[in-house]
Each structure stands twice: as structure tokens, then as C-alpha cells.
Amino acid sequence: MNKHFAKVIDPVAIATGIVGNALLAVVFLITPLRLRPLSHTLAGLGVVDLLYTLSCMLVYLTNKGVQVYRVPGACQITTFTLVFSKSVEAWYIFISHLNRLNAHTNSSRESRKRRVFNTKFAVFLVALLVAAPLLHVLW
């Protein structure tokens, strides 16, 4: 019974993660929520988690016999994506907490557009700063 459960639950969990993370990114980037600074951090979190679940799907397919890693560089890209996404995820959660703290303490000093720009810049900068030391995985 355990083996049958694992055969069913793994692909269902991965598929649910892919759909859920894609919806998370779309909701925070397309709806009127995009005007909030926190939405950009959460959308970045959704994109990073989507990358992670897609990489997990590649690992799962390889374990099931699909020859994904015969493509040159697939293993390096998967390893980079798995490590990168988990590292960035922690920083994005930290940025979201700082963003909320800033909204509660300095709400009258900065305009919302300025806070949205600062959040977008922080999300982009964190992604670059986390990716730079991990580029050795791609060699």
C-alpha cells in the first residue's frame, strides 16, 4: 500500500505545486494587487518556487526512467535551480517582512510607487547576489 501511495502522491504533489505557484505569480503580477509592494516579493517567491517544483519534476521523471539528463547541461541547470531557488526563497521571505515593517513605520514618508520600485529592485538584486556565487555549478 505504501508503494502505491507514493506512486500516486508524488506526481500529484508536484503537479499541484506547479499549478499553485504559477497561479500565485499570476495573481500577484496581473491583478490590482500588483500595486502593492509586498505583492512583488510574493510574486518572486511564486516564481522561485515554480522553478523548484519544475526541477523536482525533472528529478522525478529521471527516477521513473525518462532520460532527461542525457541533454548536455541538464544536470548542472537542475542543480543550480534547486540550490538557487531555496537560497533566494529565504531572502524573499526576509524582504517581505522588512517591507511590512517599513509600511508600518514609514508609511507617510515614501510614496507607494517608490516603495514598489524599491521592492522590485530588492527582489532583482537579491536574485543576482544569490546567483553570482552559485554560477560555479554551471561549469
Image (tube, rainbow, N blue to C red):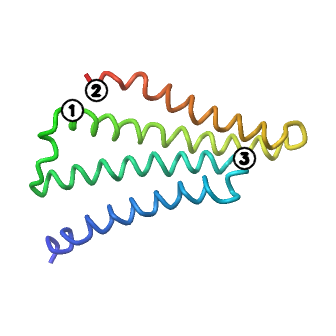
Please state the horizontal and vertical placement of residue 49, each as a whole percent of the image.
43, 50
Res. 131 image quadrant? top left
Q: Are marks 2 and 3 in contact (CB under 8 Å)?
A: no
- x and y percentages locating residue 71 in the rendered image: 16, 38
| First reached walking from the N terminus: tag 2 or tag 3 | 3
Q: The C terminus appears in which quarter of the rendering?
A: top left
Residue nearest the observer in this picture, 90 or 128: 128
Residue at the image position 56 percent from the left and 50 percent from the top: 43
Residue ID at (32%, 61%): 14
CB of mark 1 within 8 Å of CB of mark 3?
no
Amino acid type, mark 3 = Arg
| Element on which disc 2 rests | helix
The residue lying toward the viewer, choosing from 32 and 112, is 32
How dense is the environment of label 2, judged by Cα within 10 Å: few (below 14), some, or many (20 and up)? few
Q: Which residue is mark 2?
A: 138
**Circle 1 residue:** 73
Under mark 1, the amino acid is Gly
- Against 75, residue 61 (above or below) is below
In the picture, residue 84 is in which quadrant?
top left
Task: Please identify the residue farthest to the right as the structure is shown.
Answer: 108
Residue at 62% over, 39% down: 95
Please rate how many residues cluster around mark 3, counting C-alpha atoms within 10 Å: few if below 14, some from 14 to 19, many from 20: some
Compute the Cα span from label 1 to label 3.
40 Å
Q: Is residue 57 above or below residue 85?
A: below
Question: Which label belongs to residue 100?
Answer: 3
Circle 3: element type: helix
